[in-house]
Amino acid sequence: MKKLIPIILLLAFAVGGFFGWKAYNSDERRITRKLQALPELLTWNPRDGNIVRLGRANNLKEMLAQNITIEVNVGRGEVRGIEGRQEVYQALLAAQSSGMALKVEIPAIKATVTSTEAASAELTTFLYVGNDNREPFLQELAMELVKVEGEWLISKVRTIRTLSN
């Protein structure tokens, strides 16, 4: 009986560890962690070097599906759209070279897995545009993600609503 107790404890520990690991590595958590990297990749300063800009743009590109579609409000009710990973990459590089600063904050992310190959996420974003702009441009964004070769990639981004002018 004394030999059986350590075996039972070891099995209980192993089962508890397995389910704890599964809960920690759920798809929702993996998506949330991935989206939490967006502010660092989308924030830039005109003083950033070309290598830093290119590195951020390449890291962002790796998070996007090949056929990504983006339709976001860019201010004053104007909606802009971009389609395709390479076009998003080129637009990001051009924006970084504009001489304007951009600071992005994402205080809230809610990810939901809808199937084994699809997920959605809602984000609240604060965008500080310009070198001295202290007033944020607030938006709620909806994202759709697809699972490609075991990796969650952003396939669609659109503005749900704009919370500032």
Image (cartoon, rainbow, N blue to C red):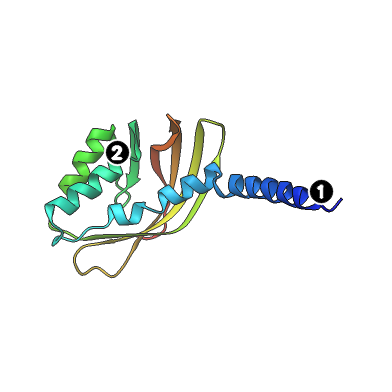
Residue behind mark 2: 81
* Count of numbered badges drawn on the protein: 2
Q: Earlier in the sequence, mark 1 or mark 2?
A: 1
Residue 119 x/y as whole percent? 51, 37
Residue 117 seen in the current view = yes
Provide residue 82's location: percent of width, then percent of height: 28, 37
In this view, 133 is above or below 66? below
Name the residue beneath numbered marker 1: 4
In the figure, is residue 58 to the left or right of 124?
Answer: left
* Residue 151 position by quadrant: top left
Residue 145, image quadrant: top left
Question: What is the three-letter code of the residue carrying label 1?
Answer: Leu
Between 84 and 77, which is closer to the camera in this rendering? 84
**Looking at the picture, how far across and down is residue 41, in whole percent?**
29, 52
User: Disc 1 on helix, strand or loop?
Assistant: helix
Location of the C terminus (image quadrant): bottom left
Q: Tell which of 111 and 148 is nearer to you.
A: 148
Which residue is drawn at the image coordinates 21% and 63% (left, top)?
130
Image point 28% across, 45% down: which residue? 59
**What label sits on residue 27 in the rendered view?**
none
